[in-house]
Amino acid sequence: MKAFGKEKFVKRTGFFEATASPDRSYNDAAHILDLRIRMDKGPLYHVGEVRITGLSPDLEGRARRLWKPKAGDPYDYAYPNDFFQAFSRTVDFRAFRKYDAVTLKGTGDHVMDINLVFESR
């Protein structure tokens, strides 16, 4: 089933395994559809270590100042895309052949380490 908008919102608040399940009932006589959506949030995930590779010391400093989540904050799976958009407004991304955010299970339960990887041209 296609993810609900609320499911994506909940996942961005740290509940990375959240799932939404619809319960439908239809009243034929009244022509009314009742829709109830159950949300199973699952465990709360947190940001672990954030590493940045492939940038000069100056650019790495800029990137670290721009990166908002700190270790222990709720893990937002989509934040790296937001970061790359914001960082691309301050740095010429044509200098990079490739850039990516690699997430790995960190130390401890429900902790995600993030490695921001940049490859110069």
Image: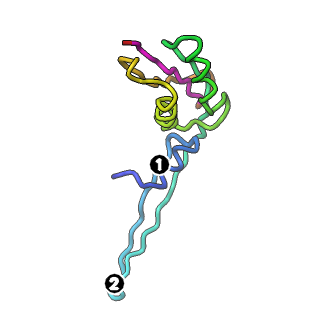
36 vs 64, left or right, is left
Residue 71 coordinates in the image, percent (x, y): 66, 28
The amino acid type of the residue labelled 1 equals Lys
- Circle 1 SS class: helix
119 vs 41, left or right, is left
Which numbered disc, 2 or 1, marks the residue closer to the eye? Answer: 1
Q: Taking 37 as reference, is 80 above or below it?
A: above
From where the camera sits, is residue 109 visible? Answer: no
Quadrant for residue 33, please give it. Answer: bottom left
Residue 43 coordinates in the image, percent (x, y): 58, 40
What residue did someone put label 1 on? 8
For the C terminus, give its image quadrant: top left
Of pointers 2 and 1, the one earlier in the residue sequence: 1
Q: Nearer the viewer, residue 111 or 64?
A: 64
Q: Taking 7 as reference, is 57 above or below it?
A: above
Task: Name the residue at 49% across, 41% down.
Answer: 17
- As drawn, the label of residue 31 is 2
Task: Name the residue at 50% across, 21% down.
Answer: 116
Magenta segment boundaries in residue numbering: 111-120
Residue 62 coordinates in the image, percent (x, y): 59, 22
Magenta-span inclusion, residue 118? yes
